[in-house]
């Protein structure tokens, strides 16, 4: 799939947190700074969700918005995030994350 550079980029992540204290103290504050450094914004960061269909047993659901998919990828690959990414993996049973573009009807042509 090619991405239009005019479209926003989104990071969607779900985590199964096992070490809440370390995740909240070491990972979240510093990661927020790296997101801001790439002009990103946290749109959703919730541990309290209302499951209305299916199964959703994740500890944390996150949606980040960036100016473009490229900006989201640059954030994820930034050296300043790499150590934090390691903390995320050490403090979670699993971490699932995707990067995608905002919706366009052209995606389905």
Image (spheres, helix red, strand yellow):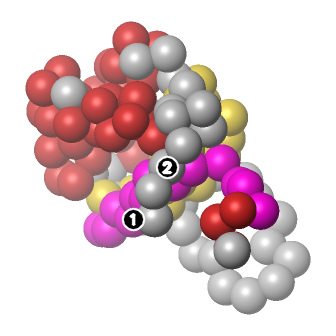
Q: Is residue 100 left or right of residue 78?
A: right
Circle 1 sits on which residue?
Answer: 96
Say above or below: 22 vs 53: above
Which residue occupies 35% across, 19% down?
34
- Say whether marks 2 and 1 touch (CB < 8 Å): no
Q: Which residues are magenta?
A: 93-105
Name the image quarter holding residue 64: top right
Return the residue nearer the eye: 36 or 57: 36
Q: Nearer the viewer, mark 2 or mark 1?
A: 2
Say above or below: 72 vs 78: below
- Badge 2: how crowded within 10 Å, few (<14), some, or many (20+)? some
Give the mark nearer the N terminus: 2 vs 1.
2
Which residue occupies 13% across, 26% down?
79
Residue that protrudes farthest toward the front in the picture: 109
102 inside magenta stretch: yes
Q: Does residue 71 appear in the picture of this structure?
A: yes
* Secondary structure mostly seen in the magenta stretch: strand
Q: Does residue 15 appear in the picture of this structure?
A: no
Which residue occupies 38% across, 36% down?
70
Q: Is residue 39 left or right of residue 31?
A: right
Q: Is residue 62 left or right of residue 80?
A: right
Give residue 77's position: percent from left, percent from top: 21, 36
Name the image quarter holding residue 17: bottom left
Circle 2 sits on which residue?
Answer: 3
Secondary structure at badge 1 equals strand
Secondary structure at badge 2 equals loop
């Amino acid at each position: 799939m090619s991405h239009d550079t005019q479209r926003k980029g989104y990071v969607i992540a779900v985590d199964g947190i096992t070490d809440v204290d370390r995740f909240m103290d070491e990972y979240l504050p510093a990661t927020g700074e790296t997101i801001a450094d790439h002009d990103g914004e946290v749109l959703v960061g919730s541990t309290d969700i209302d499951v209305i269909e299916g199964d959703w047993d994740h500890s944390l659901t996150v949606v980040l918005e960036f100016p473009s998919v490229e900006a989201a990828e640059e954030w994820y690959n930034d050296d300043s995030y790499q150590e934090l990414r390691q903390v995320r993996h050490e403090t979670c049973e699993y971490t699932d994350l995707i990067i995608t573009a905002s919706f366009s009807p052209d995606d389905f042509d």
